[in-house]
Amino acid sequence: MRTAVVILNWNGEKFLNQFLPVLLRNTQLPGVDIYVADNASTDNSLSLIEEQFPTVKTLLLDKNYGFAGGYNKALAQINADYFVLLNSDVEVTENWLQPLLNYMNENADVAACQPKIKSFYNRDYFEHAGASGGFIDYLGFPFCRGRVVGTAEMDRGQYDTVIDVFWATGACLLIRSELYNQVGGLDDEFFAHMEEIDLCWRLKGQGFRIVCIPQSEVYHVGGGTLQVEHPHKTYLNFRNNLLMLYKNLPQKSLSNIMRWRMLFDYAAAFQLFVTGKPKNAKSVFKARRDFKKMLPGFVDKRIENLSSATRTDFPEMLRKSIVIEYYLKGNKTYSKLIK
């Protein structure tokens, strides 16, 4: 079995210099190759790899295709049984990969998995992007075991059980290459953000499991390429989340959920405006406008997703609103949320 650990890079010289040595030291397993796929960087990323990390294989893309398109272009050039999508700002730990591979080898019904993701700067706490496994509520808002909205919990071992999740983070995602290709990979029209949740939704729709394996642990800087509260990140998150819902929701619930989402999105824009983030508020309106413009191009994707799905109901989708639970009821941890 061959495994390809693939870092998608765009002007990430700083992170490559910081984290590649750790990755190389802690990933000395037979059958594992390490790649850097470069999204047409303009810094010295490639010369750094050539001079200091000659064992790392490079794939050169002709322009910046974003996270989704870049990975699709890169992975199409790699022959491996497993792909590991790894952010350039992730610090892996000793023996991080083996528990993931062991579980996948022993469970053929699992399409993808992730390790426990902790904060690089606040190392006792879970990190925003993935924590100890990803979930969504029925309105499509994502949260994690260990992180709900803006509250990240301290890791006390409370979420150390292997668990089925709704989505695994793209910061460190191990996936079967055959299934990645079978469902069409990441949706490159997303460019970046939410694409791994959409991918996992499609995989789960076809009857496969997504799992978090906390016995593997990595540390994520987060916001390495786009800061957490950047207006463009707000735009991509809201636009892509709506596109994801349209692509994957069953017909019986689509209209009702979209009506509720409109109310919640406008409430979010108002909250951003009154808290001094007018550019972010504007991004929410722009996201909704562009979502409507893009809808005609997603009709065929929706038809294909629903026609290939063998299930549309998932226990990993919360039947409550995390917005109401978090802001109105004060349930700010995963354990309180799922009671």
Image: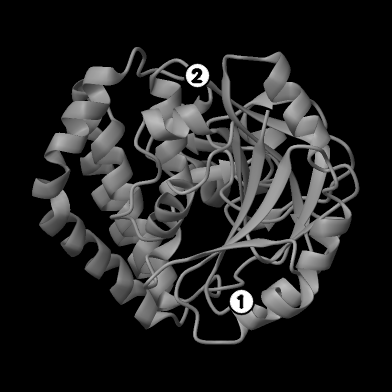
State the residue position of label 2: 208
Count of numbered marks: 2
Q: Identify the residue shown where x is 66% and y is 34%.
A: 2
Mark number displayed over residue 197:
none
Could you tell me the amino acid type at mark 2? Phe
Nearest to the observer: residue 78 or residue 93: 78
Which secondary structure lies at badge 2? loop
**Of the image marks 1 and 2, the number of the one nearer the N terminus:** 1
The quadrant in which the C terminus is found is top right
Instruction: Tell me: 18 left or right of 200.
Output: right
Badge nearest the viewer, 1 or 2: 1
Q: Residues within 10 Å of mark 1 (few under 14, many from 20)?
A: many
How was the colour assigned to the protein in this rendering? one colour
Name the residue located 68 percent from the left edge and 66 percent from the top edge: 89
From this view, report whether residue 119 is shown above or below residue 130. below
Image-based side of 147 in relation to 153, left or right: left
Residue 275 visible in the snapshot: yes
Circle 1 sits in a helix, a strand or a loop, which is it?
loop
Figure quadrant of residue 250: top left
Q: Name the residue nearer the viewer: 38 or 217.
A: 38
Quadrant, the N terminus: top right
Residue 182: x and y in percent read 38, 28
Using the numbered discs, state the Cα–Cα distance from disc 1 to disc 2 in whole angstroms: 33 Å
What residue did someone put label 1 on? 12
